[in-house]
Amino acid sequence: VKDEVSYIRQVVNLTQTTSASYLLMASLDLTRRMLALRGKEIFERVSELADYARDEVNKLGGYYAFSKEAVDGDAFFDFDLTKLSVHTRHIGLTGQEVHDRLRDEYDILPEFGDLSNFLAIISIGDSPAAVDKLIAAMSDIKKRYGKKPMELIASEYVEPEVVIMPTEAFYAETDQIPLLKAEGRISTESVMAYPPGIPILAPGERVTREVIEHIEHARANGSLLTGTEDPKVEKLLVVR
């Protein structure tokens, strides 16, 4: 056992140090060299693979992987082609559900999932076979778990009702009450669902029935809720 411990310590010392990691620095330098010499060729291949992935996803029906057609030069100026963002609402599943199925049942780990989309990243280490595996898994998930779209929450975005300035709300006298009983009150804290980490509710906004339903929907579908003093996000600080 002592020899095993010594061996493990030796391996750890090889890869972990208070000084710079020479293994990491060497790999970064090799990567820099590869990109300097073959970067254009490599990323042309990655872009082609990403376009292939989008085309195959959109052939499945129900899913939607947007591409350059979404770019308007204004609010949507451009986007990274290697990011495969797939909308899932039309198969009746949240992006988080599809993400979890891919991870748990098909050994495919996307970047993340939210209430409506999941994100996969196409990299220089991917191959057409890897993309085909993803497409086959998505097709199988749709067949096995797909539901009617209306079973999902009606809207991805909750229009905020701003009552007072966030600063005024933040410094106001507060009461902490159950979230489910907070309808009509003015929040003094934020509620965010991660991913994507965008506030559903912010200080100074009125807590509406739609806001509460959106938060509970996010909770039920596996999103991480954060932003409130209550770590479980079951209670909310509101203006007294």
Image: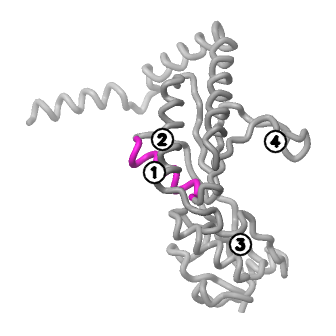
Q: How crowded is mark 4: few (under 14 residues within 10 Å), some or many (20 or more)?
A: few
Q: Note whether residue 70 is visible.
A: yes
Q: Which of marks 4 and 3 is nearer the N terminus?
A: 4
Q: Which circle marks residue 192 in the picture?
A: none
Q: Residues within 10 Å of mark 3 (few under 14, many from 20)?
A: many
Q: Give the spatial CA distance, label 4 vs label 2.
A: 26 Å
Instruction: Identify the residue under disc 1.
Output: 101
Quick check: marks 2 and 1 in contact, CB under 8 Å? yes
**Highlighted range, magenta:** 93-106
Front residue of this view, candidates 221 and 201: 221
* Mark 2 or mark 3: whose residue is earlier in sequence: 2
The residue identified by callout 3 is 201
Q: Looking at the rendering, which quadrant does residue 10 occupy?
A: top left
Q: Which residue lies furthest to the top in this view?
A: 37
Please indicate whether residue 232 sits to the left or right of residue 167 in the image.
left
Report x, y in % for residue 119: 60, 44
First in sequence, mark 1 or 3: give its number: 1
The residue under label 2 is 137
Between disc 4 and disc 1, whose residue precedes? 4
Distance, label 4 to label 1, CA atoms, is 27 Å
Coordinates of residue 51 in the picture (x, y in percent): 68, 28
Determine whether the residue tagged by mark 3 lies in a helix, strand or loop. strand
Pair 2/3: label in front: 2
Task: Give the Cα separation between the discs numbered 4 and 3.
Answer: 27 Å
Q: What amino acid type is highlighted by mark number 2?
A: Ala
Magenta: main secondary structure:
helix
Q: Name the residue under label 4.
A: 70
Determine whether 213 is above or below 109 in the image: below
Mark 2 / mark 1, whichever is N-terminal: 1
Q: Is mark 2 on a helix, strand or loop?
A: helix
